[in-house]
Image: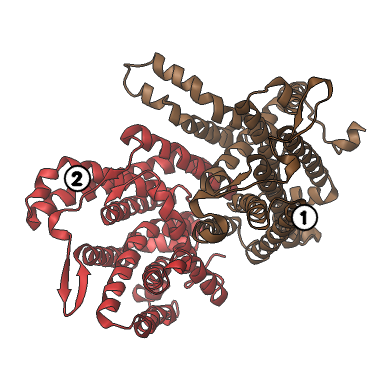
Amino acid sequence: MSAAASADTPGTALPAARLDWTPVALVLAIALAALPFVGSLPTWVTLTVAGLAMGMMIFMMASGLTLVFGLMDVMNFAHGIFISVGAYGAATVLTRMSAQMQANSLASDLSAMVPAVLAAIALAGLLGWFFERVLIRPVYGDHLKQILVTMGGLIVFEQLIHVVWGPDIIPLPRPGTITGAFIIGEAAIERYRMLAVIVGLIVFAAMWLLLNRTRIGLLVRAGVENPEMVESLGYRIRRLFIGVFVAGSGLAGLGGAMWAMYQEQVNAQMGMQVLVVIFIVVIIGGLGSVGGCFIGALLVGLIANYTGYLAPKLALGSNILLMVAVLLWRPRGLYPIGKA
Amino acid sequence: MLHTLLSGDYPRSRALSAVLLVVLVGLALAPFIFPGTRSLNVAAKVAVFVLLVASYDLLLGYTGVVSFAHTMFFGIGGYGVGIAMAKLGPGWGALALGIGACLALSLAIALAIGLLSLRVRAIFFAMITLAVASFFQILASQLSAVTGGEDGLTFRLPEALRPGTVLASPFGIEINGRLLSYYIVFFSVLALFLALLRVVNSPFGRVLLSIRENEFRSEAIGYRIVTYRTVANCLAALGATAAGILYAIWLRYTGPDTTLSFNIMIDILLMVVIGGMGTLYGAVLGATIFVLAQNYLRDLMKAASGALDGLPLLPALLHPDRWLLWLGVLFIVCVYYFPTGIVGKLRARRA
């Protein structure tokens, strides 16, 4: 993400940091290398789109975590709760609006899905605000306590989800117009996966613009590099902390809602189940790096889908093998961030 | 004698000594005081978890390192015994081989994880151990030919340890295989607990404490912190493996839900923190309270929930399945206000 830092600074102040293209090339190389193994082009297209869709959803869920870590040096082990809560929020709205979803027109489906997604973001963001205020604020700077307190928050809120929404798995039917697949040539592409790719790209683009082209983004990036300096220049870094935390939680809620619609069901453990993958993505990308998180998520999504097709037994462990390989190559992740 | 046994680390509080003594006597005489199957199972589980939690405290409380791989080592112990018994047949030789093999495997994995990831920050270690542990969980469920997959392994132990075997019956008390396995569990846990007490009160343990308190300074004094942390990680892993071995011997079963599940990792964290981090006696208290709560708090909550029937929300909060909610709240309160847990509270009262 440091690449564009030079864009809005005077030419002499800082030498332009060049974007490291190797990891990006790696994603393309892996996608191309998988082609001969998969054998048929249509299958490869289907798998690649599925991998990209999975990667985008993981990115939405993981980006908040990595940004919060980069800015506040807080690793939130309860991040999975925001994902679950987002999913439950979306499920609540969607089950209320089942009438709109029967209509089988895109406009009416959207009129159910947009409020559902907004509810997911709002609910997760609200919970994030509560988390930052009540749980994490007293333990800034103490990693051990942070891990313990966020684990405690995870336990309590997972149980509270059971209290509020009941212990059973909630089935979540997808709206009619985004189920099914369309055919390009011979390749079948699921509509929902296409939607996930588009939403993921929009989120990434919006984040990139916000971080690199606005004053708030500048402050956030400066805060990642050196929080004391930002504070001493007169900016209230606490407010920035809360803003980033709430935004990150909201993104996790969005990712959770998307993931729940992809899985077509909601349960309280879903956040925890994805959390391991999210951690792997954050580690692969380099702790605190949003760009690395994006590339890492795509890598994980693609490789999970290719191995799932080529060697199903290996698929579940492919994330770990990928992480080990990346860490052997770059011990601090694909895009290491300044602070070590 | 007592001084040597406890390595000079006394409970330092009258109330704490009394509680510990009650737990010790209760566990030692459990087959005679609580003869029922359920209560004996609870007693054996308490004993196993005391060892498991005490070895985790060596990492969390004494070294200040958070690991999520402790259940993995617990599982390696369980599966070591399980696979050896199920594949090689119920003999003492196979049991010894299984125990030796899983201890060696745990040591190798702990060493590898430690050397690779303990150099960097605590958070990184926590995340890596979480990933490795989940990988191991996947491995256990995928290699179903060896591990029995999700169903786990039910196996037969050597003749003398089977419940049906009556070894002797002096004074009308029947000494059967069940009783023998209980006392194997009990005395192994006691011996290993005292050994851990020896470790944390040795010069080595003092260095661990100094690393926890100030990593930078300890390194400046000349201690290689990576070495110390790695050795602590290996010792904790061996302790967890031993606990897994004992639990498998007691249950005559090994499966993902009894050893590897992430829920057990959360249970261990709760026990350590509620009992008291940085003191092994906390492990005894934490494990006892938690296992008792797990088995008996539900009954209590059922009664409370029934009594409050009709009120909004409260019955749902007190539903018997929500017992973990209240322990979770207690956990958070402990982290904020009583970092040394119940033991710290009891000790502070005296001072």
For the point 68% across and 65% down, the residue is B115
| Image x and y of residue B207, in percent | 79, 51
User: In which chain is the residue bearing label 1?
Assistant: B
Work out whether residue B239 or residue B123 is closer to the camera in this orientation and state it.
B239
**Quadrant of residue B129 within the rendered picture:** bottom right
| Image x and y of residue B21, in percent | 77, 24
Question: Could you tell me if residue B217 is visible in this image?
Answer: no
Furthest toward the top, the residue is: B307
User: What color is chain A drawn in?
Assistant: red
| Rendered position, B4 above or below A239 | above
Q: Tell me the residue that label 2 is attached to.
A: A94
Q: Are marks 2 and 1 in contact (CB under 8 Å)?
A: no
| Image x and y of residue A56, in percent | 32, 65
User: In which chain is the residue bearing label 2?
Assistant: A
Q: Callout 1, which amino acid? A: Gly
SS for callout 1: helix
| Rendered position, B121 above or below A189 | above
Work out whether residue B323 or residue A331 is closer to the camera in this orientation and state it.
B323
Work out whether residue A89 or residue A182 is closer to the camera in this orientation and state it.
A182
Q: Callout 2, which amino acid? A: Leu
The image quadrant where one finds the N terminus of chain B is top right
Between the C-alphas of marks 2 and 1, the distance is: 60 Å
SS for callout 2: helix
Q: Tell me the residue that label 1 is attached to.
A: B93
Which of the chains is brown? B
| Rendered position, B329 above or below B112 | above
Number of the label disc, if any, that sits on residue A14: none
| Image x and y of residue A113, in percent | 17, 51
Within 10 Å of disc 1 (Cα), the crowding (few <14, some 14-19, many 20+) is some
For the point 61% across and 51% down, the residue is B75
